[in-house]
Amino acid sequence: MCLLSLLFRGQNALGYRHYADDVLEYFVQKSVANGIDIIRIFDALNDIRNLETSINAAKKEKAHAQVAISYTLGETFTTDYYVNYAKQCEEIGADSICLKDMAALLTPYRTYELVKAIKENPSAIKASHMPDNRETFWKRYSNEDFKNLITELLPPPPPPAKPSLLRRGLHKIKQIIKA
């Protein structure tokens, strides 16, 4: 069975401006009616108020409401901060929680700390969303200590990119020039 998911920016829906609650509810209703099973909801500033309407709308339509915690660095963003935010997400109805690492700042060591702390409190983290530079992440951090953790959190690295036609063309030109 294939489940379809939708990344939803909380009160901003799919854009960068706030929408009225009725617009969000209708959009979620139509999304689920057209085959979306999981709605991954996040707010880039981790403002819980921007998630409530979307979570309620997803639950009303019987979709899986997965809340993504946006990971960032700074004095404010301690382990306790993320644990408390995960608790808030669970309290307002999240079916599952994931870490959203938009800037590839989350190391396996930090991931381990956060997953452990969050699992000791509310529900376990179900996924980790990372940008497409995960191959670098995979190579850099795939030591034995975190092999299982990384395997659970990350999909396998993408296959190496094929050389572009332009690069192959330039290579041929260089060969001709050398000859």
Image: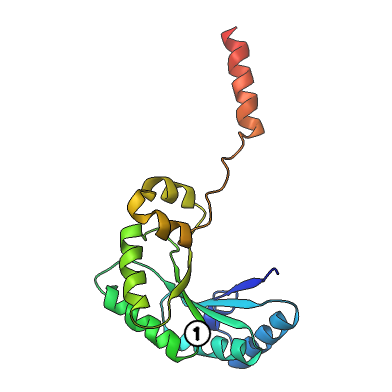
Q: Is residue 150 left or right of residue 53?
A: left
Percent coordinates x, y for residue 174 in the rendering: 58, 17
**Colour setup of the view:** rainbow
**Along the line of sight, which residue is nearer the eye, 171 or 128?**
128
Q: In the orientation shown, which residue stands out farthest toward the top?
A: 179
**Along the line of sight, which residue is nearer the eye, 95 or 173?**
95
Instruction: Tell me the quadrant of the picture where the N terminus can be found.
Output: bottom right
What residue is disc 1 on? 94
Question: Residue at the spot x=39%, y=69% of the render?
Answer: 71
Quarter of the rendering containing residue 46: bottom left
Instruction: Tell me the quadrant of the picture where the C terminus can be found.
Output: top right
Percent coordinates x, y for residue 40 in the rendering: 55, 75
Q: In this view, does 46 lie to the left or right of 52?
A: left
Q: Where 170 sits versus 112, above or below?
A: above
Quarter of the rendering containing residue 81: bottom left
Q: In the orientation shown, which residue stands out farthest toward the right?
A: 34
Q: Which amino acid does label 1 sit on?
A: Ala
Q: Where 107 sits versus 1, above or below?
A: above
Res 20 visible? no
Q: For mark 1, give the secondary structure.
A: loop
Percent coordinates x, y for residue 8 in the rendering: 57, 76
Figure disc tally: 1
Percent coordinates x, y for residue 124 in the rendering: 43, 76
Question: Residue at the spot x=35%, y=77% of the render?
Answer: 118
Q: In the orientation shown, which residue stands out farthest toward the left?
A: 75
Quarter of the rendering containing residue 21: bottom right
Question: Residue at the spot x=61%, y=86% of the render?
Answer: 58
Question: Residue at the spot x=55%, y=87% of the render?
Answer: 55
